[in-house]
Image (cartoon, helix red, strand yellow):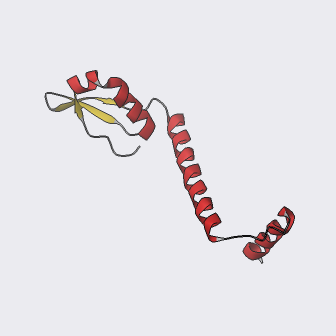
Amino acid sequence: MATALTPVGVREAKNRFSELATEVNATGRALVVLRNNKPWVTIAPADAESAERRRRAEALKALTQSIESAADEHAWDASLSDKELLGEERERRFG
């Protein structure tokens, strides 16, 4: 699991529980709740499956961004068919 979120006091955790729980699940990072300035409890995502979904979503986002930036760099000949474009790309990548 990633590093923990900034610890919060019991009163703040009570008042902002829904918001904090949403942040914990969205980031996959644990949140320490303090009582008298000492760690008391930790709020953490419930399951590893949600962390895996989050990791895959982030990987997909990164892949999408790399494809979009590559699309900006390369223009293609609109007169070529999809099959011809794929053939050219295979030739370029694999020789």
Looking at this view, is 24 or 41 the one in front? 24
Looking at this view, is 73 or 29 the one in front? 73
Residue 90 x %, y %: 78, 70
17 with respect to 9 (left or right): right
Residue 91, quarter of picture: bottom right
Residue 43 x %, y %: 34, 30
Looking at this view, is 85 or 23 the one in front? 85
Looking at this view, is 40 or 5 the one in front? 5
Residue 46, quarter of picture: top left
Residue at horizontal 39 percent and vertical 46 percent from the top: 2
42 with respect to 52 (left or right): left
Residue 76 x %, y %: 74, 70
Residue 93 drawn above or below residue 30: below
8 with respect to 46 (left or right): left
Residue 68 x %, y %: 61, 60
**Residue most toward the left?**
36
Q: Is residue 65 visible?
A: yes
